[in-house]
Image (cartoon, grey):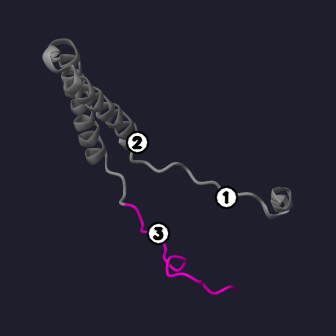
Amino acid sequence: MKLPTSRFERQEPWTPLPTSPVRELSTQFLLTMSLVFGAWYIGWRWLYSINTEALWFSLPLIVAETGAFIGLILFSINLWSGAAPPRGDGLPPEKWSSLK
């Protein structure tokens, strides 16, 4: 057996918290509200609040806010379900030679 060469090789992952329906529903509710209000805000920013006197400042700011909202959408997709995907047994040993 090979000894670990780094302190990171000795670490084991932490056990995740058990899923809770109440926690998952509250997270989904907060994510939904964030997406609804974020979409409303981005729509308002693009349609009614562009400063035409200082487009050099207002357009990059609106583009940055839109990018942050896209990041919120991706983050919400990532957090939507807290359940871990099912784990398989892995590849049987007789098929290990096909991996080389």
Q: Which one is nearer the viewer's eye here, 88 or 66?
A: 66
Please state if 33 lies on the left or on the right of 96 as rendered: left
Q: Which one is nearer the viewer's eye here, 57 or 35?
A: 57
Location of residue 76 in the rendering, given as x and y in whole percent from the top left corner: 34, 38
Location of residue 2 in the rendering, given as x and y in whole percent from the top left corner: 68, 85
* Tag of residue 89: 1
Which amino acid lies under the numbered mark 3 shown in the image of this protein? Pro
- What's drawn in magenta, residue-wise? 1-16
Q: Which one is nearer the viewer's eye here, 53 or 81?
A: 53
Q: Nearer the viewer, mark 1 or mark 3?
A: 3
Work out which quarter of the rendered image holds the C terminus and state it: bottom right
Q: Tell me the residue that label 2 is attached to.
A: 78
Give the distance between the C-alpha atoms of the residues marked 1 and 2, in whole angstroms.
25 Å
Name the residue: 26% across, 45% down.
22
User: Is residue 55 on the magenta stretch?
Assistant: no
Which amino acid lies under the numbered mark 1 shown in the image of this protein? Asp
Please state if 75 lies on the left or on the right of 53 as rendered: right
Q: Which one is nearer the viewer's eye here, 36 or 42?
A: 42
- Magenta stretch, main secondary structure, is loop
Mark positioned earlier in the residue sequence (1 or 2): 2
Identify whether 51 is placed above or below 85.
above
* Tag of residue 3: none
Location of residue 93 in the rendering, given as x and y in whole percent from the top left corner: 80, 64
Location of residue 96 in the rendering, given as x and y in whole percent from the top left corner: 81, 61
Name the residue: 63% across, 87% down.
3
Which amino acid lies under the numbered mark 2 shown in the image of this protein? Asn
Mark positioned earlier in the residue sequence (1 or 3): 3
Give the distance between the C-alpha atoms of the residues marked 1 and 3, in whole angstroms.
19 Å
Identify whether 24 is placed above or below 34.
below
Identify whether 54 is placed above or below 22.
above
